Image: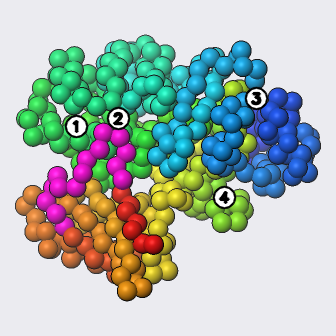
């Protein structure tokens, strides 16, 4: 397996980058003002190296401005509005043109095809519809591919299980948390032998290998990590392929950088930092150097599957998920890794931070699997946290199924320090 040639990719993307910057100067009053104030003219940004000096775009700009302030087309070109879930603040409003909707559907269809889904499959779509991008995005991809969409939408677990059994759905789309919830409910009711599921496209949150193995065991499926964010179309801008070596990103539509989140310095492939995305083809609200706050790296190795699209590592965590305790930065992805190394540990956990008498205290709540002793699992997890992350933590192991499950995104970090 060779190495991916990013220099060649960036050379191929340069004309689209130049055209985007010109389009922003011509059509986006917000970006025209922002770039001009930073001393840039349309011809100044020609390569990815030039981008390093260009100011990044952050979610607060999208959130604090008027809802459609960053629109770069006349309003009559906008055919749809979506919104972020607002889990970290005021929701962000995103306008889509017909071209954006078509490009997104085609990218989503690529994800399904990469996961081995064909027009013979029946796809149960459990994420929500409406302003959230997930439900309608998955449906557009299913229909583009010619498969059968079963648009159950969010919640109503009784109906979900009924449809899985009666319609013999072969593909499940869900948040990873809801897939786990459904799997445990299916196990409790003894329904697994009555299912036809074989594939799951799961996303909307970061989830680790321990959770992946648990979901696959419960549902009897192969799972694929689908990546995306509302500001950049929605889910479907990338997927891990059957080789499961990383997440392929559709770089004919998107230009990727990984930067040091503190300094903004561009990092070379292989170094972990914050993923920054430039939308090369988006029309309604193109974004230049958008900070995703997701921590990952550009994979150096080319994928053994032979795909021409480069990969990022599965997301380690978010810069705003990071907690600092006793001088050490902790990301949820590190805890996932520790659970993967701890025999008898389940996939679910909580990080609870408090401060007592001026000292920070970290309590890690985990679940232990049947047939294992909670005290033994907790002690091994505590040892792994010390060895792998470098801090002493209190670990409490509770029986499997004790920690809360979610139909959307599971909250992992509870910081009660003042």
Q: If you read the primary sequence from the N terminus, does the residue marked by circle 1 or circle 4 appear first?
A: 1
Q: Residue at x 48, y 52 (%)?
A: 315
In front here: 155 or 178?
A: 155
Give the CA separation, mark 1 to mark 3: 41 Å
* 67 to the left or right of 23: left
Please rate how many residues cluster around mark 1, counting C-alpha atoms within 10 Å: few if below 14, some from 14 to 19, many from 20. Answer: many
The label shown at residue 174 is 2
Q: If you read the primary sequence from the N terminus, does the residue marked by circle 1 or circle 3 appear first?
A: 3
Q: If you read the primary sequence from the N terminus, does the residue marked by circle 3 or circle 4 appear first?
A: 3
* 164 to the left or right of 304: left
Q: Are marks 1 and 2 in contact (CB under 8 Å)?
A: yes
Q: Residue at x 54, y 33 (%)?
A: 83
Q: If you read the primary sequence from the N terminus, does the residue marked by circle 4 or circle 2 appear first?
A: 2
Q: Mark 3 against mark 4, which lies toward the viewer?
A: 3
Where 417 sits versus 295, above or below?
A: below
Where 315 sits versus 85, above or below?
A: below
Q: Mark 1 against mark 4, which lies toward the viewer?
A: 1
What element does badge 3 sit on?
A: loop
Give the CA separation, mark 3 to mark 2: 32 Å
Inspect this view and state whether residue 341 appears. Answer: no
- Residue 20 screen position, x and y as percent: 79, 34
In front here: 143 or 7?
A: 143
Q: Are marks 3 and 4 in contact (CB under 8 Å)?
A: no
* 3 to the left or right of 342: right
Reading the image, the residue beneath label 4 is 259
Reading the image, the residue beneath label 1 is 182
In which quadrant will I find the C terminus? bottom left
The segment highlighted magenta reads 397-411
Q: If you read the primary sequence from the N terminus, does the residue marked by circle 3 or circle 2 appear first?
A: 3
Reading the image, the residue beneath label 3 is 72
Give the CA separation, mark 4 to mark 2: 30 Å
């Amino acid at each position: 397996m060779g190495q991916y040639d990013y220099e060649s990719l960036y050379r191929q993307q340069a004309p689209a980058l130049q055209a985007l910057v010109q389009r922003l100067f011509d059509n986006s009053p917000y970006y025209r003002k922002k770039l001009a104030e930073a001393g840039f003219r349309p011809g100044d940004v020609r390569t990815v190296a030039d981008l390093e000096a260009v100011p990044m775009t952050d979610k607060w700009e999208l959130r604090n401005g008027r809802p459609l302030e960053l629109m770069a087309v006349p309003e009559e070109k906008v055919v749809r509005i979506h919104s972020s879930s607002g889990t970290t603040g005021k929701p962000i409003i995103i306008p889509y043109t017909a071209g954006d909707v078509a490009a997104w559907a085609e990218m989503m269809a690529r994800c399904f095809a990469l996961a081995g889904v064909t027009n013979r499959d029946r796809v149960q779509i459990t994420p929500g519809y409406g302003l959230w991008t997930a439900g309608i995005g998955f449906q557009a991809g299913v229909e583009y591919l010619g498969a059968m969409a079963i648009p159950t939408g969010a919640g109503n677990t009784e109906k979900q299980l009924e449809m899985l059994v009666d319609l013999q759905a072969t593909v499940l789309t869900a948040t990873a948390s809801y897939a786990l919830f459904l799997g445990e409910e299916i196990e409790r009711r003894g329904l697994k032998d009555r299912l036809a599921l074989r594939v799951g496209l799961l996303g909307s949150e970061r989830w680790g290998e321990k959770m992946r193995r648990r979901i696959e065991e419960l549902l009897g499926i192969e799972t694929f990590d689908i990546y995306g964010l509302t500001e950049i179309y929605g889910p479907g801008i990338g997927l891990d392929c059957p080789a499961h070596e990383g997440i392929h990103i559709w770089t004919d539509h998107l230009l990727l950088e990984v930067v040091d989140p503190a300094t903004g310095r561009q990092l070379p492939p292989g170094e972990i930092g914050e993923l920054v995305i430039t939308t090369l083809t988006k029309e309604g609200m193109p974004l230049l150097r958008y900070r995703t706050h997701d921590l990952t790296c550009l994979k150096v190795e080319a994928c053994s599957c032979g795909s021409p699209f480069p990969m990022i590592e599965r997301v380690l965590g978010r810069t705003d998920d990071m907690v600092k305790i006793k001088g050490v930065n902790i990301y949820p992805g590190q805890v996932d890794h520790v659970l993967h190394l701890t025999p008898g540990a389940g996939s679910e956990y909580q990080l609870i931070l408090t401060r007592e008498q001026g000292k920070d205290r970290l309590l890690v709540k985990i679940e232990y699997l049947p047939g294992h002793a909670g005290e033994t699992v907790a002690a091994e997890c505590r040892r792994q946290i010390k060895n792998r992350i470098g801090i002493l933590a209190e670990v409490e192991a509770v029986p499997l199924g004790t920690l809360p499950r979610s139909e959307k995104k599971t909250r992992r970090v509870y910081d009660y320090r003042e």
